[in-house]
Amino acid sequence: MKFEHPAGPNPIDQMKVVGRPHDRIDGPLKTTGRALYAYEHTQGVENPAYGYVVGSAIAKGRIRAIDDAAVLASSGVLGVVTARKAGELGKGERNTAALLAGPEVQHYHQAIAVVVAETFEQARAAASRLKVSYGRSQGRFSLEDQRGAAKEPEGENADKTSGDFDAAFAAAPVTLDEEYHTPDQSHAMMEPHASVARWNGDELFVWTSNQMIDWGRGDLAATLKIPEEKVRISSPYVGGGFGGKLFLRADVLLVALAAREVRRPVKVALPRPFISNNTTHRPATLQRVRIGAERDGRIKAISHESWSGDLPGGGPETATSQTQLLYGSPAIATRLRLAELDLPEGNAMRAPGEAPGMMVLEIAMDEMAEKLGMDPVAFRVMNDTQVDPMNPERPFSQRQLVRCLKEGAERFGWSRRAAPGVTQDGRWLVGMGVAAAFRNNMNMTSAARVRLSADGRVTVETDMTDIGTGSYTIIAQTAAEMLGVDLDRVSVVLGDSSFPASAGSGGQWGANSATSGVYAACVKLRRLAAERLQFDPDDADFSGGRVRSGRRSAPLGRAARNGDLVVEDTMEWGDLSERYQQSTFGAHFVEAAVDRFTGQTQIRRMLAVCAAGRILNPKTARSQVIGAMTMGVGGALMEELAVDKRIGFFVNHDLASYEVPVHADIPHQEVVFLDEADDKVSPMKAKGVGELGLCGVGAAVANALYNATGVRIREYPITLDKYLDRLPEVA
């Protein structure tokens, strides 16, 4: 099926099952330990051995020699795999650095070997006896130092302009020109990267933790230089990914090589202190924002520039993407610059682009409102646009930013907000902050298989993953709505590469795309079932477990009385995303308190108002948004990978020293979803929502702290050392 025209009325519009706050159908399995994560699989994994990964002790240079004699002589050791022993390997198209180094080392903790033993403890102990001789080279570890050498990326990340920014900015009576900094950050998911592998002849089966099954399968086959059909990947439950599991990582390659080496199943998990430097992270940015406006507050010019770094062959953090779309202006200029650094690989993390970009743009908007003497909400409302500002002939499919801001302001009590540094509650300085929320909608090709059995049960199979966001539930809701059965009559099986390839989980594209694929398969099954029942397919109604046409009706299962009905289909996308700008919008409001004496910060309450198309399951969607809001607080106040710029690694590479907030840190979080059904985006009329809950939060926190204290901070995270000496004097 191809989605080429705005969606008309369809069975999803009934919203008997879709749009309802159903509990997660996988919840009981997870709370009772019956949902098996990657490292826990035992079926088909008889007598597994254990692998322990050894990472490079240098960030840049070459391996001169590896002496594994002492390792191989250690108790329980079955083998050691290095790049030399592994033979010639390829590299997946989505990997910047090699997943097994040798002889060249590209970054600290790049995997250089895996030691395999009978037990995990034996493998770990033996790995410490591996002797490695290095030749260290001079590396580049500071974005600030490499800023001048940064280059304009090619392709879609090249500079973008509309109008004459320089002239418009020079003519503007009120201007802002400031620089901001966001740090390197870690994904910090609960489940570490882990895999179990088994070879059957030349066929490889891997249980792993991966967000994108089809990508992982293809890149693993390419790296091992074997046919893709010889690789099967299973990832039914993923304990968090946040972009860190979008791509093939070292655990998957090394477990496959280890299992091949010792000729038995092997388990490999990356230890927590290994993840920050071995896998991917969000790169730091240096950003400059310039805004020019008339005295009445109308923006005439916006420029947003961002510098970030990555390994050679990598890409930039696309921090300027939202600035091309969020506010109306006759002159807009965005520019990305990419520096080559020898730090671990930078890549997608928690709304890449918009998350760090909104952390900056929305502080700048607050600063500009102050220069103009305007309320920050009113300033944003005044500069709303219903068309793509860089392509005015292209309207938004739906855009309710103004409603989000106004309704949020009313709900939050924004009218009570006072001037900076004025409101006190005992020893606490209290302030309110606001930021717009923005995340682009993205659609990806997605397929599914749907099976109807004679007992009226429906089974959905797709390689879609559930990363804790509720994929099982919304897919079941879609099938139940389309086929007119109760939710408990639908079984969903996910995360296996033997199933039709879906959109996968990531970037806020998963829910809408994957359910659209299920929708397409269900349309085909409805037609086939009606034909088997000798009903008119164009007239058939599916409800209450029955099919009705005119005065006739029959149980749905009767259509499969001669054998299961099985169909597959794929949702593909036409040019509607080119004709209409498809985005999600919202507003974040934060109340923060700062201790006048100690500088301690508390987030007292938060509100997110979101317009993101049809909400498929308000309960799971709310969970995603409050989780994202909590991440946003972490990005604002706590999270930072500290770089040792002498030898090139992230120092605080475990959860004992990498600080993240928890829900208990924030007493009150409220989420409001506006009614919206966007017929331009999919037959589901839905869009993604999870990452919208993050984009803008950091700035809302920063703006609230400014309102509380009168201290403006332009460098994240906003830690005590950056403002304690600037707090108002205590009488």
Image (cartoon, grey):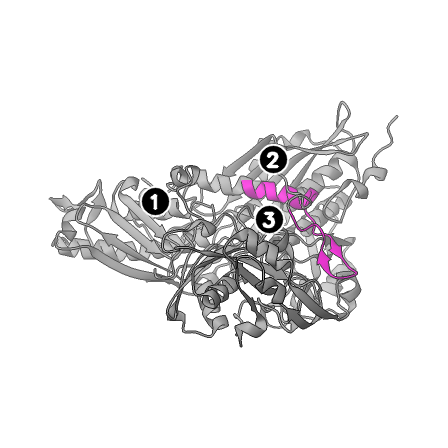
Left or right, 80 with reference to 678? right
Left or right, 654 with reference to 620? right
- Residues packed near mark 1 inside 10 Å, few (<14), some (14 to 19) or many (20 plus): many
Outermost top residue: 426
Residue receiving disc 3: 188
Residue 436 visible here = yes
Badge 1 element: helix
Badge 2 element: strand
Badge 3 element: loop
Residue 682 visible here = no
Earlier along the polypeptide chain: callout 3 or callout 1?
3
Choose mark 3 or mark 1, whichever is in front: 3
Quarter of the figure with residue 33: top left
Proximity of marks 2 and 1: CB atoms separated by less than 8 Å? no
- Residue 347: % across, % down: 60, 60
Earlier along the polypeptide chain: callout 2 or callout 3?
3
Magenta stretch: includes residue 190: no
Residue pictured at 47% horizontal, 65% vertical: 262
